[in-house]
Image (cartoon, coloured by chain):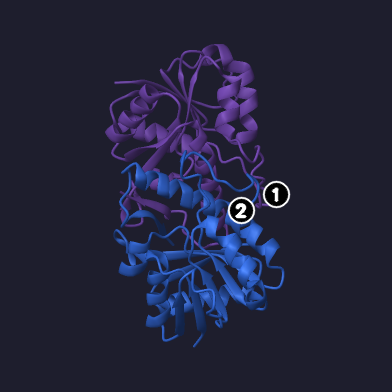
Chain colours: A blue, B purple
Amino acid sequence: MTHISIIGKGNMGQAIAGIATKGGNTVELFDTSDTDQVATGDIVVLAIPYPAVAGVIAARSDQLAGKVVVDITNPLNFETFDSLVVAADGSATAEIAAALPQSRVLKAFNTTFAATLVSGAVGPVPTTVLIAGEDADAKALLAGVIAAGGLNAIDAGTLNRARELEALGFLQLALAVNEKVAWTGGFGVIA
Amino acid sequence: MTHISIIGKGNMGQAIAGIATKGGNTVELFDTSDTDQVATGDIVVLAIPYPAVAGVIAARSDQLAGKVVVDITNPLNFETFDSLVVAADGSATAEIAAALPQSRVLKAFNTTFAATLVSGAVGPVPTTVLIAGEDADAKALLAGVIAAGGLNAIDAGTLNRARELEALGFLQLALAVNEKVAWTGGFGVIA
């Protein structure tokens, strides 16, 4: 059993809370504005949009030290829908890892639409969460939580692969917004 | 019916030739070394590895003028398997489009393993070819060839999206090489 904090009560935060609860973990779920609530989880999921991340880090960097911190963001320019807003050779996750040197930062959940986390399926394919990050133990801990919640998890590589996961998330969002894929579909992972 | 040239007799070139033939198009398939064979197709598919592209362009830029040129490459650093070798904010397709200003250059087929082009399926999901490029008519022409050959095709956006398609192709190759997905699987597109 793992103790998990989820900051962000949107569709993604609630879906991830559901997975973690289903797997028998303890979960605390609160909003970005709940700044007086201390994140006590061994895993802290930042289930917030990219522009909100810097503020949460500034407010909670002490709390996040020693924790596994999970970044789910897709750092798009939502005005143009034509680029990411992070460095072309970097990622939001790399930025967060640099800002939280005492945390073990992972990328996950940015390539799975909320509906596919709730249903457990991307069309006919079981939902798979792709995880990237430097720390193998942290990745295994998160993968265990995901598997206990009934989904597949794949270690997609080191922190460098967060760049490709963000590109994948971007492409998937662009296809969904343009009605080329459904919000219950997108990219299914066939192992 | 479209007349299609495919340069490159590897797995991908043969698979694409099969699709085009199945759809009732005329196909000429030859090797990179067949430099005396003129590419006469309305569509010319460069079914060759990224390092071979510059040589083919140098030898055939006149032939390629006015044609729809299809880039299928995944421009990986295959020594490190940790990055692409093109500019971080660019793509192989953007390079090729710059080198062939009189051609209409498209990205396609780089996110579909050869086996999934032959079988028509990524696991339980029908194979979808993602296409990116500037010219809508060129994309529609290629999408028609793909559909006639029994596969799905999706217009994934402008030339800028080739960057994300190459990131997706890179990630899929990295997962397959690390045995996280099968060469008959990978990312299926669920519309």
Residue A148 appears in which quarter of the rendering?
A: bottom left
Which residue has dot 1 on it?
B79
Q: In this image, A183 relative to A109: left or right?
A: left
Which residue has dot 2 on it?
A91
Q: In this image, B74 relative to A61: left or right?
A: left
Whether the residues at callouts 1 and 2 have beta carbons within 8 Å, the answer is: no
Query: Helix, strand, or loop for circle 1?
Result: loop
**Residue A59 percent coordinates (x, y):** 62, 70
- Which residue shows up at 43% across the image and 53% down it? B187
- Could one spot residue B100 in this view of the protein? yes
Crowding near the residue tagged with mark 1, few <14, some 14–19, many ≥20 C-alpha atoms within 10 Å: few
- Which residue shows up at 56% across the image and 48% down it? B170
**Residue B49 percent coordinates (x, y):** 59, 36
Task: Report the chain holding disc 1.
Answer: B
Camera-nearest residue between B35 and A149: A149
Camera-nearest residue between A187 and A38: A38
**Residue A117 percent coordinates (x, y):** 37, 67
- Looking at the rendered structure, the kind of residue marked 1 is Glu
Camera-nearest residue between A167 and A69: A69
- Which residue shows up at 70% across the image and 61% down it? A98
- Could one spot residue A127 in this view of the protein? no
Q: In this image, B133 relative to B52: left or right?
A: left
Residue A185 versus residue B142 in the image, above or below: below
Do the residues at pointers 1 and 2 share their chain? no
Q: From mark 1 to mark 2, how far is it between C-alphas?
A: 22 Å
- Which residue shows up at 45% across the image and 82% down it? A27
Crowding near the residue tagged with mark 2, few <14, some 14–19, many ≥20 C-alpha atoms within 10 Å: many
- Looking at the rendered structure, the kind of residue marked 2 is Ser
Looking at the rendered structure, which numbered label has been put on residue A174?
none
Pick out the residue farthest to the top. Answer: B62
**Residue A129 percent coordinates (x, y):** 46, 65
